[in-house]
Amino acid sequence: QVQVVESGGGLVQAGGSLRLSCAASGRASSNSAVGWFRQAPGKEREFVASISGLSPLTYYATLVKGRFTVSRDDVKNTVYLQMNSLKPEDSATYYCAVRRSPLTSSVPSTYDYWGRGTQVTVSS
């Protein structure tokens, strides 16, 4: 079993930055792909970014490309989501998800383990 825990959310003004962390424990593999998703009230969960398990390949949703950066520290079994130039529309609960596969995906159902989420609120 793999436990996934997000942290780093909070309240920030528009234009500000936050760094989210995703710590995986248990039987997490450094070869696992990791994705970030978000869900705002009344909306479906949407893909934000992902990083592959075999190389530093990263993928971003169009809405966050150029503002968000995903990275991983395999020694610490932690993946980060650096979020810059935040906008009010970025407000949501952010979830980290881990795949047993090293291949990234933007589809939530392809991920095997999920954290409980961390709230990000961007004020205007």
Image (spheres, rainbow, N blue to C red):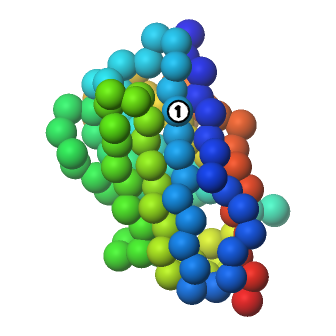
Residue 62 in view (yes/no):
no
Residue 46 in view (yes/no):
yes
- Check the image and report above or below for 66 versus 83: below
Residue appearing at x 52%, y 19% in the figure: 25
Quadrant of res 103: top left
Q: Position of residue 91 (x, y in %)?
A: 70, 69
Q: Position of residue 21 (x, y in %)?
A: 53, 46
- Check the image and report above or below for 38 versus 67: above
**Amino acid carrying mark 1 in the image:** Ala
Q: Quadrant of the N terminus?
A: top right
Residue appearing at x 64%, y 85% in the figure: 14
- Check the image and report above or below for 43 versus 33: below
Quadrant of res 49: bottom left
Q: Quadrant of the C terminus?
A: bottom right
Instruction: Quickly name the residue at label 1.
Output: 23
Q: Residue furthest left?
A: 55
Q: Give the number of marks.
A: 1
In the rendered structure, the answer to whether residue 90 lies left or right of residue 81 reads right
